[in-house]
Image (cartoon, rainbow, N blue to C red):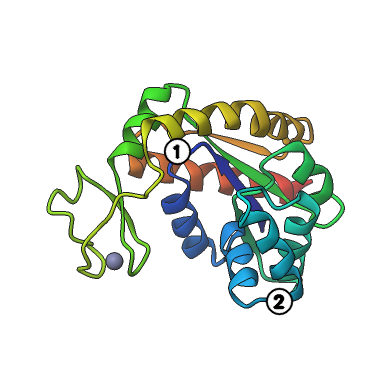
Amino acid sequence: MKLAILGAAGSGKGQNTSRIAKKYNLHHVVVGDIVKAEIRNKTEVGKIMYDFTSKGRFVPSDIVMDVLAKQLNTFPEDEGFIIDTAPLNMDQYNKMVSLVNLDAVISLEVENYNILRHRTLNRLICPSCRGVTSVTESPDEVCPYCGEKLEHRYDDNLETVNFRIAQYLRETVPVLDEFEKQGKLIRINAELSKEEVFSQICQKIDNFFAKKSLK
Ligand SMILES: [Zn+2]
């Protein structure tokens, strides 16, 4: 199973990806983490990437996709993975198609942007175990997984949320359309409750691969 997951900030990507990876026994590949690790380890490509990020610029798609492909190539052929979050734009998509052949892409869809705004502004993260929860679920602001004091992400404010939503519509939605044309898109209504969203994902993944195996 070679999957990618896409969704706007607040669509529930982090939590659902962890659960999907666990349930289907997949490597959980976080693109941002690979980039950060290369920079931290000061590899050749890490130094080039640092040049961009330190100036507040995006790392070019071909560099990001190369390090992603390198990571995927370390997995044995019979082991699956789920990529969180790529390809984010058509540039990454065009580079990625020559490197990775995905079976399916899961799209977490929220049409009511107020839900995205509310979830993002309500979000709490754990600096220690990186668990994600919310003000509603953890009003004491203590991590339910490890007991650490929870924090808001520094850039979770209304202005950046609106910016991320607009960017998602402009840059990522065209990527979804491409996967749709190839019959690889699994659309999920991510406005529902956590448990409803996750069971919907599992059901649709199971159906998708059951149909695929019949072909
Ligand atoms: Zn924690």
Horizontal and vertical percent for residue 195?
34, 44
* Amino acid at dot 1: Ser
Horizontal and vertical percent for residue 89?
71, 38
Residue position marked by numbered label 1 in the rendering: 11
* Kind of element beneath mark 1: loop
Work out whether residue 106 can be spotted. yes
Residue 116 vertical position relative to residue 136 in the rendered view, above or below:
above
Structural distance between the alpha carbons of marks 2 and 1: 33 Å
**In terms of image quadrants, where is residue 149?**
bottom left
Graded by Cα atoms within 10 Å as few (under 14), some (14 to 19) or many (20 or more), the crowding at tag 1 reads many
Along the horizontal axis of the image, is 155 left or right of 2?
left
* Amino acid at dot 2: Thr
- Which label number is shown at residue 43? 2
Q: Quadrant of ligand 1?
A: bottom left
Work out whether residue 76 can be spotted. no
Q: Residue furthest front?
A: 55
Select label 2 or label 1 by which is in front. 2
Q: Residue at x 23, y 62 (%)?
A: 143
Q: Residue at x 46, y 40 (%)?
A: 200
Residue 83 vertical position relative to residue 89 in the rendered view, above or below:
below
Q: Residue furthest right?
A: 98
Horizontal and vertical percent for residue 215?
79, 46
